[in-house]
Amino acid sequence: MITILDYGAGNVRSVRNALIKLGCQVKDAVSADDVIKADKLVFPGVGSFGLVMSQLVKDGYVEPLLERIRQNRPFLGICVALQAFFEGSEESPGIAGLGVLPGQVKRFSVSPLSVPHIGWNDIKLGKSCSLFQDYKGEKMYFVHSYHGLLDNVPEQWRLAATDYGEEFVSAICQGNVAAFQFHPEKSGTAGLNILKHFVEEERITVSNNPADTLKKIPKTQIAKRIIACLDVRSNDQGDLVVTKGDQYDVRESGEVRNLGKPVELASRYFEEGADEITFLNITGFRDFPLTDQPMLDVLKKTSEKVFVPLTIGGGIREFTDSQGTFHNSLEVASEYFRSGADKISIGSDAVYIAENYRRSGKASGTSSIEQISQVYGAQAVVISVDPRRVYVQSPGQTSHHTIETEEPGPGGEKYCWYQCTVKGGREGRDLDVIELVTACEKLGAGEILLNCIDKDGTNSGFDLELIGHVRDAVSIPVIASSGAGSAAHFYQMFSRTDAEAGLAAGIFHREEVRICDVKALLAEKLIPVR
Ligand code: 1PR
């Protein structure tokens, strides 16, 4: 029996699904006694350090947790749960951690690398450990902005480190007590194997290698991510299908294109090696997300089979339902996290928020971006951008951020700006892509999903000028999206821009290109992939 310490973290469902996949019986800790007496305790944590610690204090779990660690009873912490071992964190000044390890957790300051550290990176194991007996050097999935300093970790606790501009502790272990900064429940089969050894083995064994082992292991490298995107909507018969637009037009001879069933396609992409999977409910702006049971079911079913990160977007905003009940966006996002999402993506609402922010010049504190990132962490909030080019003869013709383009306009115009749209490209706004992404970063977003209406479904390659334009303007990761027609387009994009990830839909749905083909070409070209 595995007991989960569920304080409402976003990834609890993913951890529960992974343990159930491993054949475990799982129950939630409901009392301090459970925390101490549980055979094996798993503590999944995402979100802010302060939120985690204040929840533990509120539930009276701090002392029982410390007692469990003192009694060396089997314990596995994930992500923020590792950070909670330290005395405190820069993320939440004045809030005490468990204090098992000395020192403060720090925010990454690794420019020009983007923060949060989102993606697949290696771990340097300094000791051999029974939890890693099947480990063959696979990359693990990380999603965090703060980290513990290796120097603060006493030798007897050090297990693994990882590099991301600076070296940080990615695993600790002493006796039967272990914790990881990475997410084993979202690190594919390799991650499940590590969880399996925690579940199956009576106790954790660690053999000491020479203390300087870690120093001898070469720096780790984060991989470029390959993401499969499933644009989902109900067709005219009311079935939820995966569809795909050409420049956002999803109809073919009047019918909604049907490219397959969401759960099946997502499972196929997981098997084929996708690093992440994104669902975009493209008519979400019309629906009441909390009553959109079919989409929630797709997420629940997918999260039982897919052990890489899941992002869900479409319709995430505050709304008043048909009974006149008001629902804030945090409620909507929480329902998606509880249903298995690891990240949520905000589209139209982000445009309205950025417009308000630019008008008022200050954060409202109530926007969906602010509310959700404060509770679940910036790394859980993706902004899905739907821009289209507007050509101008000269930059002076507009107040918007323009670029000089190598792809002149219909009238030979050498300049253009990128107009933001809402409602799935149906409505253009007086806001450019730079005004949008910079406002959203300031308000707490953790990643940009940069689509391009002009390129969507064209198989003509990514809009490299747009990607460079946005990558230079923000310090959060950018996912390049729209237009991929071949594996070579991914190589072109990763070799000519600093985007952290590449996303495609049509070529994967139509099986014109497989995810493994893209990765094989990138690896051949020495672009790091998982
Ligand atoms: O505005 O918060 O309700 O979110 C709606 C979301 O759905 C937005 O993120 C928007 O990007 C997306 N969306 C809305 N309408 C459409 C449409 O196609 N009619 N799809 C749409 C956007 C963009 C990508 C696509 C890439 C790759 N599609 O998701 O996967 O362009 O495609 P490709 O590789 O085939 O070129 P809200």
Image (cartoon, rainbow, N blue to C red):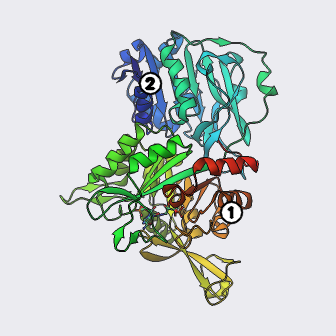
Q: Position of residue 301 (x, y in %)?
A: 36, 41
Image position of 218 (left or right of 425): right
Identity, as a three-letter code, of the amino acid under mark 2: Leu
Identify the disc placed on residue 176.
Answer: none
Disc 2 residue crowd, few under 14, some 14–19, many 20+, Cα 10 Å:
some
* Label ID, residue 472: 1
Q: Which mark is residue 22?
A: 2
Measuring 33% from the left and 23% from the top, which residue is drawn there?
30
Q: Which of marks 1 and 2 is in front?
A: 2
Q: Quadrant of the C terminus?
A: top right
Residue 208 in the image: state x and y as whole percent. 72, 13
User: Which secondary structure, mark 2?
Assistant: loop
Task: Decide: is 23 above or below 317.
Answer: above
Residue 312 appears in the picture as rendered: yes
> Marks 1 and 2, how far apart in space?
43 Å
* Nearest to the observer: residue 82 or residue 335: 335
Q: Can residue 115 be seen in this view?
A: no
Examine the image and state in which quarter residue 33 appears.
top left
Q: Residue 431 in the image: x percent, y percent?
A: 52, 74
**Label 1 element class:** loop
Identify the residue at the far left of this view: 323
In the displayed structure, would residue 327 be above or below residue 270?
below
Give whichever of 50, 190 is nearer the camera: 190
Task: Choose top left, top right, bottom left or bottom right for residue 60.
Answer: top left
Q: Nearer the viewer, residue 218 or 235?
A: 235
Is 474 situated left or right of 453 in this image?
right
- Image vertical order of residue 207 relative to residue 316, above or below: above
Callout 1: 10 Å neighbours few (<14), some, many (20+)? few
